[in-house]
Image (cartoon, rainbow, N blue to C red):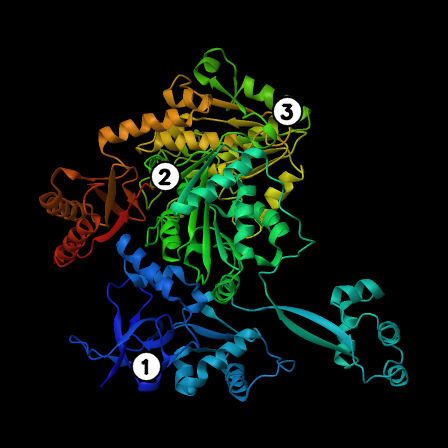
Amino acid sequence: MMNFIEVIIPLPIKSTFTYTVNESEFNFLEPGFRVMVPFGKSKFITGVVLNKHNQVPISYEPKEIEFIIDDEPCITSNQLIFFKWISEYYMTSIGQVIKIALPKLLLLKSESEILLLKNDISEFNISNDSMLLFNLLMVSKKLTYKDLILKFEKSKLNKVLNELLTYSIITLKEEVYDYFKPKLINSISINESIDLESLKNKLIGKRSQLIVAKDLILNKNKLKFTYNELIKKYGVSRETINNLIKAKILIKSSQIINRTQFEIEELVKPKKLSDHQNNALLEIESSFIDKNVSLLHGVTSSGKTEIYVNLIEKELSKNNQVLYLVPEIALTTQLIVRLKKYFGEKLLVYHSKYSLDQRTEIWKIVLKNPGKIILGARSSIFLPYNQLSLVIVDEEHENAFKQFNPAPRYNARDCAIYLGMIYNAKTLLGSATPSIESYYNAISNKYGLIKLNKRYKGIELPEIFLKDLKESTVKSKMIGSFSENLLVNIKSTLENKKQVIIFQNRRGYSPYQECESCGYVFECKNCDVALTYHRVSDELKCHHCGYCVSNENKCNKCSSNSLVKKGLGTQKIVEELREYFPDYRVERMDQDSTKNKNSFFKLINDFEENKFQILVGTQMLSKGLDFKNVELVGVINADNLIYFPDFRSQEKCFQLIQQVAGRSGRDKSQGKVIVQTFNPKHSIMMKIKKNDYLGMFNEQLKERHMFDYPPYTRIIKVILKNKNKETLKAGAVWFFRSLKTRFENKVYGPEFPLIPRIQNRYINVIQIKIPINENLLKSKKIILKIVSSFESISKFRSIQISIDVDPYN
């Protein structure tokens, strides 16, 4: 009887693959092990064992695996269930899910080049096989996995690579921007075999070295030092210390430490909850008795985080794991500071701004260590939890929980709910402005509902004023992008030693540049969209494909110099504010200004410490940040949020402005919000002014019922792309007609989206609305069958097709 394993290949391939294993490998392997397998003619790739069986494949002859990578499963059985659900629900291959879910350093490929990082390894005690590889690299400088498989026994290869990676002697070219290397701390101590007499003989004429070594021999209160400690203590150079090490008078040793550790001060007890917070906490715990999911609807600055902390503390006391999910990396910055005071080394942080090394380490820690709280953005749902008992989704309404590209196009909030179900854990959704779907589920008794309507310390919600831009323009009371009223309020706020936040949901300087002579607009050569002008770099950039050209101040069509920059971005707002308030420091927070790993932390920390007074930003500002000294929030133009071709535009407008408004008046006094708009009497603006969430909810729910939108339907979007416009249109019409025969009047399209061409590919979109009471799985099977037929037609094979389930969630 032959033994086989079914292996998931981390590539966007629909099927899994069967490989042969010998009897001992068959008995040893379990689902979740990583194995190196041949794939294609000359390629080796990491695969994940899905199951093992004895059924011979019919359509092909299975190959043997190369070797087993792990000593124990790297992926848990619950993870495999979760990954399979994501694959099925979001209509993508499980291989693509694995590719996105696992840190890249866990997915080795034979094309990856192994590079030498160190030429001197005398301080490391490594095996003979590792020394052999080191010597080969000293000659070749780089080798591929394919080269190594020819030179080493399969069983030894992974041990050799792991050993050299551990000491940062080698690295992988595939991860050229972020190599895997453990964090090392160097400590220096005196060689105890050295006495004073021999020391004096060795260091004749070397006064600085003698002072250091003599003092260390005579005073042994502290045995180990860092470089900086010795330099500071004795006032010597680093070279002096290195010379003592070379002379073997001092000994340098390296110790691997966990890079996820924080500098922990003495832990503090969570704050005492107010009566309102305590009642909410009791209601949450009561709702968890018969509901797996509950929604905490608490106004901004009501103290939801402290309620979360109390729930987390109880779970950690039982040695359980907690996932604390936030929509933006920026939000983790402040939370890290707060949570580490309460939980110390039990806190782990996981998101895409962390290096591959850090993410790989955290993966391994979560796999083996219960009693941890994991704070992370959407990718943290993929971690290998072993004792998960509570999932918290903060700011659950946020669109940032949705992954758009690449597939799987999942929503981390919805996935977190399913993840909790797999582990029999409770899930708490929290928001001051819940999504329509979540609130609908709560009032329908599917979720528990807990309300927290009072701010912490009894501070009033900020007062919101709507400033009519039409009136200000007619009365000549506009100064640049600001109404006179907003500038007066900014001035008085700054004079009172308070801080200001200005919200403009568009980055760059100007959305487009136009020639006044001929009307020419500078457009991207790859996309049907205007190039955005960036003043800082003096460039025109496309925010969709990255295309960039320098600004030559001359029209490409008529060569005129009469160019004008239209529209308004964060860079222009900053420039205006610096002109109006030259004595105050103005900074901005948007995607351009926060590209580096620590840029979020520095910007937020500086604002908290009042190092600058005005913060200008995009929707990043609305994501639950807590600034004690902010008294005024200004919204430059709210109309851009309302008039957007999306059925959620009014909901999103309400949420964004309410959330950014909630950044003001969070400490001692009531804050103030000034919203500039040309439509102050618009129904959504009136509800924003009154903080009327229920009014917005009921109005939107009525409209969605009328026009068959969620939560009354599920939407599946089919996106077709091709470089040839006519081929695309023909394919889209064929696909639409095929869907129409099965779904009748529930199919909409095909149509070009708002931006019809991106990265030289034209786009057509078809949408299917599936009533909530119809079988979603059956509908998906029909769509996938049509996709399969479409891909078999030769003239349509060049058309790229992708599916987005719940595209607007």
Evaluate whether residue 11 shows in this view.
yes
Report the residue marked by disc 1: 26
| Quadrant for the N terminus in the image | bottom left
Q: Which amino acid lies under the numbered mark 3 shown in the image of this protein?
A: Thr
Residue at position x 16%, y 74% in the image? 59
Mark 2 / mark 1, whichever is N-terminal: 1
Q: Which amino acid lies under the numbered mark 2 shown in the image of this protein?
A: Ser
Residue at position x 48%, y 14% in the image? 472
Residues under numbered marks 3 and 1 in contact, where contact means CB atoms less than 8 Å apart = no
Residue at position x 50%, y 13% in the image? 476
What percent of the width, then of the height, locates residue 420?
Answer: 40, 53
Tell me if residue 190 comes above or below residue 611 in the rendering. Answer: below
Residue positioned most to the left? 741
Evaluate whether residue 303 shows in this view.
no
Secondary structure category for the residue under label 2: helix
Q: Residues within 10 Å of mark 2 (few under 14, many from 20)?
A: many
Name the mark nearer the viewer: 3 or 2: 2
Secondary structure category for the residue under label 1: helix
Report the residue marked by disc 2: 438
On the image, which quarter does residue 196 sit in?
bottom right
Query: For residue 493, which numbered disc appears in the image?
Result: 3
Horizontal side of residue 344 vs 80, given as left or right: right
What percent of the width, then of the height, locates residue 314?
Answer: 54, 51
Residue at position x 23%, y 43% in the image? 765
Q: Label 3 vs label 1: CA separation? A: 71 Å
| Quadrant for the C terminus in the image | top left
